[in-house]
Image (cartoon, rainbow, N blue to C red):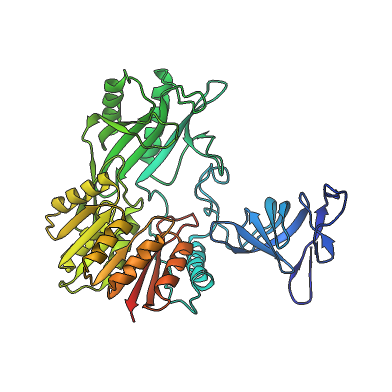
C-alpha cells in the first residue's frame, strides 16, 4: 500500500485472480492503472460508514463497499463483486486498527446478525447516525443544510430491549438449537450462550426452555417437511414494572406438558406474569400465530412510560427500547407545541402510545390504525390512564383520510409514524389536502423520511427541525422526529 502526494490511498494488490471473463478477455475496468477483479485481495482504508452498516473505502474515486471494518481501519479485503462504478469486498484481516474501535463484550459478535456496531465506540455511533440522517435529507430530499440536531443517545446501551425473538431449529445430528440467526442467514440458528440486548433473566429463560424441550422430547419445527412443534420463543419485559411474558410459538397440535411447563417457569422466574402459546400452522416462519392460548397467569403485562401505564399483549407492537421511547414521545410533544385547544390526528397510531402522550395538551386526539388488535389495545390504554379525549379508528390510513377529506375535517396538527417503507403517495396527498398547520413525522428510516419530506416541502410546508433518537445502540438503525410548519 502506498500514499500519493495528495494524501489518497493507493491500492496495493496482494493476490490477483488473473482470470479472463467468459469470452476469454481481460475487460475489467482499471483503477490506478491496475485491473480490479472478483477474488482480488487488496489493502484498503475504511473511510466512512453507509446507512445500512456497510463500510466504505475509496480507491482513486472508485467506491468499495466493504463487509466489516470501521472508519480508520486499514484492512486486507477480498473483492466479492465488481461493477462499472463500484466494487464490493469483505474483510479478511485488520492490518491497522482504527482509534474509533472498542472491544466487543459479546462472545457471538461478528457471527450473530445483531449488534454489528458493537466494536465502534458509542459516541462515534451517534455521530455516524446523525450524519446518515443529514446525508439522506440532502441527497434524497434536496434539503440544503437540513436542521438536524445531534442524535439523542441512550444512557443504557446494553440490556435495553424489552422484546426478543429466539428461534428453534432442528439439526441433522438431532442437536437441539434455540437461539438467534447468524448474520444474513435466516435459515440457520446458533445456540445462544448469552445476549446483552434484553436482560440476564431473558438469557436464563432461554437456557431453561432449551433444556426443558430436550428433556421432554419436544421437537423443533422443520419448515420444509412441515413437521415438529416448537417454532419461536418470544420474551417480552416491562422494564419499569418488572413483569415478563413468555410466548411460545408452536406448530399446531397438542401441548401435553403445558401445566408442568408453566409451573416450572413461574417457580424459577418470579418476574414471569404471563405464559401464552401462539399457534402458527402457516408456511410463513414468523413469530405470530393465528390462534392464541393462555397457558398460565395473565394474558397481558404492563409497562410504564413517564406517568402513563400501557398494556402489552403477545402480538401488540410496543417500542422495544422504553428508555428511549419516552424521549421520543416527549420530543413529539415538544415539536407539536400544543396549547390544549387543538384537535390532532395520529396516523399509524399502533397501541396508542403517542396519542396518550398528546392527550393532556390537546383538546382531542384521533388515532388511526389498520390492525384491529392494536386498536383494542389503544382503547384499553386510554382507559387505563383515565383518558377520555382520545378516539381510535380501525382502518387503513389512506382510506380513512379520503373520508376525512370529503367531510372537510380540520386538524391543527397531524402526527405520522409509518412503517419503514414510509408513506403511501395517497396519504401524502390527503395530508396536504387537509392542510394542517403542523406535521410531526416520526420515522425509523432516513431514506423514506427524506423522500416524503421532499413531497411535503415542495410548496406547502417548511422543514423546521429534525431530532434523531437512538433507539438501537450498536446497530445502524436510527429514529427521527421531524416537524413541518405550513408556509
Measured along the vertical axis of the image, is residue 360 above or below residue 16? Answer: below
Image quarter in which the N terminus is found: bottom right
Measured along the vertical axis of the image, is residue 263 above or below residue 187? Answer: above
Left or right, residue 471 beside residue 94: left
Left or right, residue 290 beside residue 37: left
Tell me which residue sits at (29%, 47%) in the image: 371
Tell me which residue sits at (28%, 39%) in the image: 244
**Front residue of this view, candidates 145 and 12:** 145
Measured along the vertical axis of the image, is residue 53 above or below residue 285? Answer: below
Tell me which residue sits at (49%, 63%) in the image: 447
* Residue 161 horizontal/vertical position (percent): 37, 48
Let me know if residue 306 appears in the view.
no
Let me know if residue 484 appears in the view.
yes
* Residue 107 horizontal/vertical position (percent): 53, 42
Left or right, residue 414 beside residue 161: left
* Residue 289 horizontal/vertical position (percent): 34, 34
Tell me which residue sits at (18%, 68%) in the image: 361
**Front residue of this view, candidates 287 and 364:** 364
Amino acid at each position: 500500500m502506498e500514499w500519493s502526494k495528495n494524501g489518497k490511498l493507493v491500492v496495493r494488490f496482494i493476490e490477483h485472480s488473473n482470470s479472463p471473463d467468459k469470452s476469454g478477455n481481460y475487460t475489467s475496468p482499471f483503477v490506478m492503472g491496475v485491473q480490479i477483479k472478483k477474488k482480488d485481495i487488496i489493502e484498503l482504508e475504511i473511510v466512512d460508514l453507509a446507512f445500512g452498516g456497510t463500510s466504505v473505502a475509496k480507491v482513486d474515486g472508485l467506491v468499495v463497499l466493504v463487509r466489516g471494518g470501521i472508519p480508520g481501519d486499514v484492512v486486507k479485503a477480498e473483492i466479492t463483486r465488481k461493477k462499472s462504478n463500484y466494487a464490493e469486498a469483505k474483510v479478511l484481516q485488520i492490518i491497522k486498527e482504527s482509534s474509533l474501535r472498542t472491544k466487543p463484550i459479546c462472545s457471538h459478535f461478528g457471527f450473530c446478525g445483531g449488534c454489528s456496531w458493537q466494536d465502534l465506540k458509542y459516541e462515534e455511533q451517534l455521530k455516524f447516525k446523525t450524519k446518515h440522517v443529514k446525508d439522506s435529507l440532502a441527497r434524497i430530499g434536496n434539503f440544503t443544510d437540513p436542521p438536524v440536531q445531534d442524535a439523542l443517545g441512550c444512557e443504557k446501551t446494553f440490556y435495553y430491549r424489552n422484546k426478543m425473538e429466539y428461534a428453534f431449529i432442528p439439526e441433522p445430528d438431532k442437536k437441539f438449537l434455540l437461539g438467534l440467526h447468524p448474520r444474513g442467514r435466516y435459515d440457520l440458528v446458533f445456540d445462544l450462550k448469552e445476549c446483552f440486548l434484553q436482560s440476564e433473566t431473558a438469557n436464563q429463560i432461554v437456557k431453561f426452555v432449551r433444556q426443558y424441550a430436550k428433556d421432554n422430547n419436544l421437537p423443533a419445527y422443520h419448515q420444509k417437511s412441515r413437521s415438529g412443534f416448537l417454532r419461536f420463543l418470544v420474551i417480552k419485559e416491562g422494564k419499569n414494572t418488572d413483569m415478563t411474558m413468555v410466548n411460545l410459538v408452536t406448530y399446531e397440535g397438542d401441548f401435553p406438558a403445558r401445566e408442568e411447563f408453566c409451573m416450572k417457569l413461574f417457580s424459577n422466574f418470579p418476574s414471569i406474569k404471563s405464559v401464552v402459546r401462539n399457534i402458527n400452522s402457516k408456511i410463513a416462519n414468523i413469530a405470530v400465530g393465528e390462534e392464541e392460548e393462555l397457558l398460565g397467569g395473565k394474558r397481558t403485562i404492563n409497562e410504564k412510560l413517564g406517568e402513563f401505564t400501557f398494556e402489552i399483549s403477545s402480538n401488540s407492537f410496543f417500542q422495544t427500547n422504553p428508555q428511549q421511547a419516552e424521549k421520543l414521545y416527549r420530543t413529539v410533544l415538544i415539536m407539536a407545541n400544543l396549547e390544549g385547544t387543538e384537535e390532532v390526528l395520529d396516523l399509524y397510531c399502533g397501541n396508542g402510545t403517542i396519542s396518550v402522550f398528546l392527550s393532556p395538551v390537546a383538546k382531542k386526539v384521533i388515532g388511526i390504525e389498520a390492525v384491529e388488535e392494536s386498536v383494542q389495545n389503544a382503547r384499553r390504554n386510554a382507559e387505563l390512564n383515565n383518558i377520555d379525549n382520545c378516539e381510535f379508528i380501525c382502518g387503513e390510513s389512506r382510506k380513512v383520510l379520503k373520508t376525512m377529506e370529503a367531510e372537510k375535517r380540520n386538524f391543527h396538527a397531524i402526527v405520522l409514524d409509518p412503517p419503514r417503507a414510509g408513506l403511501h403517495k395517497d396519504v401524502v396527498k390527503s395530508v396536504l389536502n387537509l392542510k394542517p398547520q403542523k406535521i410531526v413525522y416520526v420515522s425509523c428510516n432516513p431514506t423514506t423520511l427524506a423522500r416524503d419530506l421532499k413531497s411535503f416541502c415542495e410548496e406547502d410546508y417548511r422543514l423546521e427541525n429534525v431530532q434523531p433518537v437512538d433507539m438501537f445502540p450498536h446497530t445502524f438503525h436510527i429514529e427521527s422526529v421531524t416537524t413541518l410548519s405550513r408556509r
